[in-house]
Image (cartoon, grey):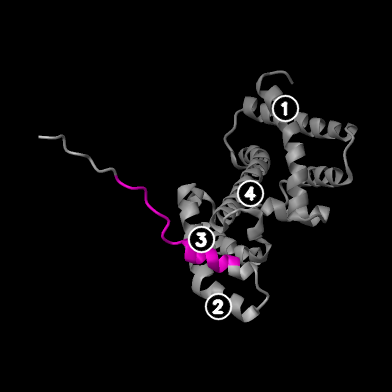
Amino acid sequence: MPPRKIKRRSKSKNHYFTKVHEDAIVKYANTEDTGLRSTLYIEYIQPAFDQMVDKIIYTYRFTSLPNIDYLKDDCKVWLTTILNKYDPNKGSKAFSYFSVVTKNWFIHKVKKTQKRNRTEVFMEDILNELEEDLVSSEKTYYQLRSDAEFWGSLHYEIDTWDSFMLKENEKKVLMAVRILLDSAGEIEIFNKKAIYLYLREITGLNTKQVVNNLNKLRKRYKVFKGKWENGEI
């Protein structure tokens, strides 16, 4: 009896982005007729984009991004704005082109989130130190002395940062950090995000500018904290 042949499972096909959808995008790119474009988008392109975005999110595990449902809808809207940038004459298939740009869009969001998280760590470190110093009422003499030495050293360290060739926005953020540290007992900080509101108000900078310059200060603070913990200061 001849050996039984084992049938291999065929790879799952892309049923949501077929040649019909590919042709619809090509027609969309090659026409200036707004009525035809609207019909092509509603009947063929939008449903394909919806499923493509959902599949990319789960395939590449972008589900861990905060506000992923909002980002998902935002990406789908963004795709409609770049439809006219697709050029079928360059040899790239529509599915490949829009899959790549969609994946890159989410990768950019991941990097942006990671950068924001790194910045928050810097302020969180300082706030945690400050919180421990203000909240605890049962500290020993040694702890109180150690805290006083830490904050004294930190203030001195921050003062030395002026000797670096700082840009104007760096100086503004550094000054704002000083003000917050000096006024720690007088201001109310309900959560970590509140610190950005204070920094924006003091510096007059937008969130992106504050974040970028805090990242630079964070590197110096990290060096200081390492030296302090190793007894080098």
What kind of residue is marked 2?
Thr
What kind of residue is marked 1?
Val
Find the distance from the CA under tag 2 to the CA under tag 1: 59 Å
Quick one: which residue is furthest to the left in this view? 1
Residue position marked by numbered label 4 in the rendering = 108
What kind of residue is marked 3?
Asp
Q: Is residue 205 magenta?
A: no
In this rendering, would 161 be left or right of 128? right
Q: For the residue labelled by badge 3, is the local secondary structure a helix, a strand or a loop? A: helix
Badge 2 or badge 1: first in the primary sequence: 2
Q: Nearer the viewer, mark 2 or mark 1?
A: 2
Of residues 154 and 36, the one nearer the viewer is 36
Label 4 Cα crowd, 10 Å radius (few <14 / some 14-19 / many 20+): few
In this rendering, would 152 be left or right of 85? right
Q: Is residue 20 magenta?
A: yes
Residue 93 image offset from top left, x and y in percent: 57, 55
Label at residue 69: 3
Badge 3 or badge 1: first in the primary sequence: 3
Label at residue 223: 1
Q: Are marks 1 and 4 in contact (CB under 8 Å)?
A: no
Magenta residues? 9-26
Q: Are marks 4 and 3 in contact (CB under 8 Å)?
A: no
Label at residue 39: 2
Q: For the residue labelled by badge 1, is the local secondary structure a helix, a strand or a loop? A: helix
Badge 2 or badge 3: first in the primary sequence: 2
Quick one: which residue is furthest to the bottom in this view? 35
Which quadrant of the rendered structure holds the N terminus? top left
Q: Answer yes or no: is residue 71 visible.
A: yes
